[in-house]
Amino acid sequence: MSFYIHDSEMETFICKLIDRFAEEGRPSLHNNISLTWIVYKGQIPKDASGIGVGFSGDKLIYPASVVKLFYGCAIETWLNKDLLVETKELRRAMYEMIVNSSNDATSYILDLLTATTSGPSLHSTRWEIWKKQRNVINDWLYSFRGTEFKSINCCQKTWTDGPFGRDFDFYGPSNQNKNALTTNATAKFMELLMTGVLLKPTATRNFKKLLLRSLDLVKRKADPENQVDGFIGEGLSKGTQLWSKAGLMSEARHDASWFITPEGKTMLLVIFLEGKALAKDNFLLPALANELSNWDK
């Protein structure tokens, strides 16, 4: 059972939209886009109050930096359970991981969460213990209610040049153990966070500050890595409040967003694009966001 109420009009709208963008020079779009789109009642919706639709929403996809959203919330959960000690260095890493999408900060965060470190290959008992520890974030996610989290995988660091040593080994010979998310799982996670269900109130407020993106053109020009231009935020109207986490690499352009329009409509929109052509497509995510944010049933 879905965590949102399926809406047939929204489904028709999104299917026609994808058809149109595919015909405009993106012949593989239907096979390389996954999307979850939910519209809520009110600016502070209650859990499961939204109507929505998914397009390949259960397809497992390499999430690139969107996984940092999950790691950041795990940090807040570990802190609440006294599994970690809060330090200035932890907070600095959290900021860099979410606001600037730093891979180095993410590496440090994952080490803290799992009590593991990168390094040369391990063997025998030490290797088995290391692998078990690296999966503690998955264990946490699999404990959630609902089926959306049962097949995802959040256990790897994010890379600039790629993994080495024990991290390389952990991916498996065919990279079968790489991080994997669905847009449905990401949307559900974002909903739990933004509605205050996932974290304590103070942690929720602090984390939302890290996800808040400015649509101001001057601020965006000063920060080329703003996670707005080329992503969902670029397509939203002036005055929209946006919280988001983007992911970009050579074969992926993703974004997970929660926004409130100037008219007071609250929406959750997660879009994953796969393949080299779509990863380079700066137009598609903003164009989809513009169409969907202006949809009015």
Image (tube, rainbow, N blue to C red):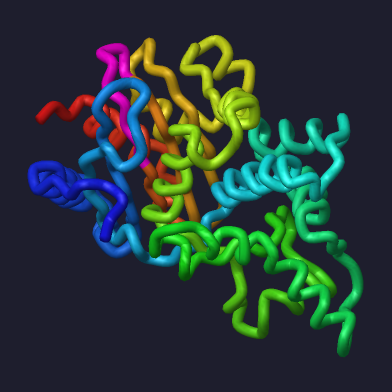
Q: Is residue 224 visible?
A: no
Q: x, y (%) of residue 234?
A: 41, 26
Whether residue 78 sits left or right of residue 67 in the image: it is: right
Q: Which residue is depicted at the point 9% across and 48% down?
A: 8
Which quadrant of the rendered structure holds the N terminus? Answer: bottom left
Is residue 262 magenta-colored?
yes
Viewer-closest of 189 and 110: 189
Which quadrant of the rendered structure holds the C terminus? Answer: top left
Q: x, y (%) of residue 48?
A: 31, 42
Total numbered badges shown on the rendered structure: 0
Whether residue 252 sits left or right of residue 105 in the image: it is: left
Viewer-closest of 185 and 257: 185
Is residue 29 magenta-colored?
no
Whether residue 276 sits left or right of residue 206 in the image: it is: left
Q: Is residue 149 visible?
A: yes
Part of the protein shown in magenta: 261-269
Name which quarter of the figure residue 113 lies in: bottom right
Viewer-closest of 280 and 238: 238
Viewer-closest of 83 and 238: 83
Q: Residue furthest front?
A: 81
Q: Which residue is depicted at the point 14% across and 48% down?
A: 11
Q: Residue furthest bottom?
A: 124
Name which quarter of the figure residue 41 lies in: top left
Q: Which residue is depicted at the point 49% across and 54% down?
A: 252
Q: x, y (%) of residue 31?
A: 29, 64
Name which quarter of the figure residue 29 lies in: bottom left
